[in-house]
Amino acid sequence: NVIATKLIQPVLKQWLLTHDIVVNNYEFIVTKPMKPANFEDLLATKPHHFVFTSRVAVEQFFKLLRATKLQLHNSCICYSLQGETKTTLQKFGITPLLTATSARQLAQMIRLKGYSESVIFCCSDIRRSELPTYLQQQSITVHELVLYQTVLQPQKIMHHYDAVLFFSPSAVESFFELNQLINTQICCCVGNTTAQALRQMGIANDQILIASKQTQEAVAKLVCEYFEHHQ
């Protein structure tokens, strides 16, 4: 029995079921789009150097871009996390110049490459501070573009489960508001940033598994491989 802290693709649920793993979908967070007051002003500045760390930020950014009929400058540079964030950018015709597995690693790469004196960080109203804090410490100006609101939806899980699938630090916070883990339960997470949020909740490293890629498919494969070797 596995808890997913977001709705996972039906095809993945079915695939896991063929491996005797039952997934219970919950939505521990919901997102609500926002239009920041500084959207047009920031898009008027050149050059455009954007940082994306979530799929939702990418989708909302391009939705606003269409609504305002603004265009990206030809010299636009995008930095992003790997996995769904990167693939969503590619769906909109953008290939990130740099990608990383965590926000901290992405910030370090931005500094090392030295392409940007300032960046526009596209994010939620709830966001981790590693990336903007690190860049600002390295004298890189960070303009925050808050594109959506993240709302926590804590829910008490009353039935037995063997593992929890986490896809964001916000989901970690929401889950542990009303739930606890015992040492036989494991956490499968989408990336290093989410894993760090679990450690900050006091979860031991041997209970944390990190997917090889930041996708739902990779998390599903991870939990399947774990139970194949721990029956």
Image: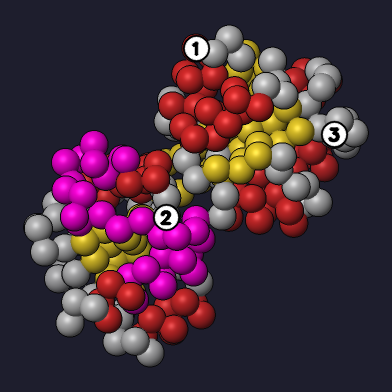
Q: Secondary structure at mark 3?
A: loop
- Residue sitting farthest toward the bottom: 18
The image position of residue 207, as x and y in percent, is 20, 56
Mark number displayed over residue 190:
2
Q: Secondary structure at mark 1?
A: helix
- Residue depicted at 41% across the width and 60% down the height: 211
Question: Does 63 sit above or below residue 51?
Answer: below
Q: Nearer the viewer, residue 66 or 191?
A: 191
Q: Is residue 70 left or right of residue 181?
A: right
Q: Position of residue 223 (x, y in %)?
A: 33, 70
Instruction: Please give the name of the residue rendered at 83% of the width and 19% of the height, measured from the top-left corner.
Output: 46
Q: Quadrant of residue 143?
A: top right
Disc 3 to disc 1, C-alpha distance: 28 Å
- Place residue 156 in its image quadrant: bottom left
Above or below, comparing residue 74 to residue 3 in the picture:
above
The three-letter amino acid code for the residue at tag 2 is: Val
Looking at the rendered structure, the kind of residue marked 1 is: Gln
Q: Nearer the viewer, mark 3 or mark 1?
A: 1
Which segment did they paint magenta? Answer: 196-224
Q: Position of residue 205 (x, y in %)?
A: 21, 49
- The answer to whether residue 215 is magenta is yes
**Observer able to see residue 120:** no
